[in-house]
Image: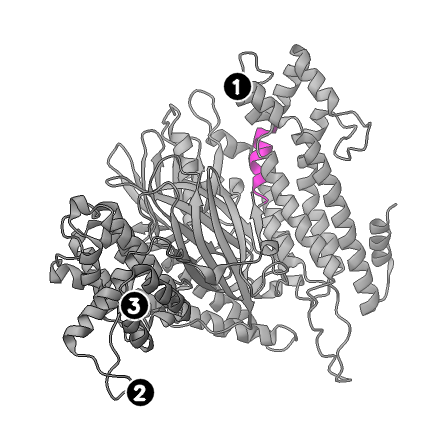
Amino acid sequence: MDVYQEALLYLEEQHSPLSREEMSETRLVVLKSILESEEVYLRELDTLLMPIKALRASAGTSQPVLTSQQVQTVFYQVPELKDLHQSFYSGLKARLKAGGPAEDPPDDGHTGTKCRDHGPVVGDLFLKMVNQIGLYGGFIENYEKAVEVVRKCMHSDQRFRTLAESMMSNHGADKARTVYTLEALLYKPLDRVTKTTLVLLDLLKTTPSEHGDHAVLQEALRLSRSFLSGVNESSQSRRGVTLSHGMRRQLMRDGFVVDMSEGERGLCHLFLYTDLLLCTRLKQSVRGKPDQYRFCWYLPLAGLRLRWFAGQERTSEANIRLHTIRTKIYLLRQQLLQHSRGSRFLTSAARGRRKLEQMELTLLTHSPHCRLELHSPSGKSHTLLFSSLYELEEWKEAVYKLTLNNIETVPPDLLTLTGACVKLRMTQQPPLHNPDAGEEEESLCGTLGVAVHSACGLQQPACVYVCVEVDGYDIYNNQAQTHSSIHSLNPHWDQELSFQVDAAHNLNVLCVGQADGQDDAVLGRTTVKLDSSSLTKRWRRQTLQLQQVEVTLSLRFCPHPLQPPSSTFQQPPVFGVPIQTLAQQEGALVPHVVRCCVEEVERRGIEEVGIYRISGMTSGVTALKAAFDSSLREAVTQLRGAEVHAVSGVLKLYFRELPEPLIPTELFQSLTQAVETQDLDSRLAAMLPLLQSYPDANRHTFLYVLHHLQRVSSWQHVNKMSLLNLATVFGPSLLRPPVAGVGHKGPTVDISQEVVVQVQVVFSYLQCNNLPEAQISALHDTDPEDETTHM
């Protein structure tokens, strides 16, 4: 008898209630035993998965050990089960190691003191695992087929038999190896899932009713029992999802999405089977009765076409509505947290939780804006909305792979198919925050900064942007995108994105390519675990591997207490703002408006006759200016289609409208004296040191523009724009004389001489062949020891 069983037996034999200390110690023994059991199970799954790489590699040869289909059958859902239990094991281990988060005990009502707590809050971990227990449904459905393949190949193929026997070796220090046979290992998940209910029952016995875990564990137990009941009674539903030629209609994926129908949004449960998509609505369950689904629509996968859109700007009315919902949710959560420690206000707390759930469902319904369109050959179309582009891409990939096969479309028995959904589902409920689960110590609450620098590894030049998503109680609604790069193999953004995060654990990063006349294409994606121990207030540079694309970014985090949702974000203006202020807002030394215009001119205007000398249409320049002042992403999109002289006009207008000129006014007299020197080398020797006195943003922006104008002038045989011509255009915009009487004590300069100085200063700098290079994002520079790489 192990320590775990002894503790439970001791608990059952007690005729009088255990003290708080005894209850807490017993509960801790149970949790440690569960952790040890999970560790053993993970080793068994590791052993089971040992040969999968070799078998997959062999499947692509002329003499495979197993075909690709057989490999899929034998190991179906096993990697997903391992990931599920690895996540649970890691979370439980961290909680037990930290000894928390421990809740405040209730007031005893007599002494006025606080008693000891009952240990770490772990109920949310069990509930999260049970919410995904549906993964076992697919494994159980497939189990007989998997065993049949193993038995057949063990008798007919010596290579497979040798491989299977090598897994049974117990020699060496490899702990992943075991004495179990392959067939016995396949039985382990079946055995494991039946023990889930027993484990939850045992844990509940040692969890007092006032403990924050009690209600959560009860819900997890209910879901576990419901799942096992569905497995035991599923023989009839299995017959109902069989195709005419004997193949089983298998559930591949399910989850909650928003269905857009005739302009109205509705939260639905979407099921992806091997041959169709089924959209259902979960009926409100009556106490004591099982869940039921109501049929909405279905689409055969054969010939199904997919189109997706990253999302459009919300209307101001929609933003106001979402802000109001978030504010109400924040206030209600605060109230529930204040009253969750005691036994008082139980009725009002229950009512508050129901209200919170309804508001979160409303937010989940109205916040998604990433759109997936489904178009059937029959002419039927449906639109689904997702809060996360990452989730949309996962669904799109899963559906697309199934549409590639020649799938027989068999009209389903909709009543039977919809009725089977409750038993086959992998996702039990929408991703709502349970205030009883306790605050998770590993989550982030504060301000997360993400500076997206560059990407490499593109197979061909493309216009790409990076989408960043952060999870939390806002259901991946924290999403931001960089502007789209120019057509390039190695795009650069150096764009800073900022997120106010609450209970954040993960960061999704997607690289998206754009092509004229085609849908955007996700070139790569990955998820980064947000570790509070490694994130600091200093920028930390990382390189992420997104399939074939590498994205370099920097992260920093400033923790602070949870704050009410901020009002609808309004981008601060770009034009007419001091350049140092804009640099601080954007987290870059060279403003995006300057870089974007320069890149666009170099892309398609560098050979344009009279570039920068010929003015663009006033309406085009005004429209671009307004776009930059409202949305950088929208401005870059308009920039691509704008007339190139309007693009160059926007750049000149930006410098003209700076409150203080790019070249500091206090240097005007020093520069005037310098340009009077006839010898160019002597003149530059006096002028170049003055660059060091510029503020950082001014200096690097000026250098960036100078290098650009030198490149433009290198095409003067085509565009007719020499260095002197360009200096004549830009001189008056970049340098202005001091205003008499405003702190100016030097000699005055007449207007004709003023223009000469302005042109000659810029012309002199343009003639320098060894100008320092401009730095674009020094604000995100990190020390080498701070750099990390995620592969």
Residue range in magenta is 133-144
Disc number lying in front (3 or 2): 2
User: Mark 1: which amino acid?
Assistant: Gly
N-term mark: 3 or 2? 3
Front residue (pair 346, 515): 515
118, above or below 299, in the image: below
Question: How many residues crowd around disc 3 within 10 Å: few (fewer than 14), some, or many (20 or more)?
Answer: many
Task: Give the image quarter of residue 72.
Answer: top right
Residue 141 lies in the magenta-colored region = yes
Residue 438 percent across, percent down from the top left? 62, 65
Give the secondary structure at mark 1: loop
Question: Which disc number belongs to residue 574?
Answer: 3
Q: Nearer the viewer, residue 295 or 454?
A: 454
Kindly check if marks 1 and 3 are in contact, taking CB atoms under 8 A apart as contact. no
Circle 1 Cα neighbour tier, 10 Å, few/some/many (<14 / 14–19 / ≥20): few
Relative to 150, residue 588 above or below: below
Image color mode: one colour
Where on the picture, by quarter, is residue 193?
Answer: top right
Q: Amino acid at mark 2?
A: Gly
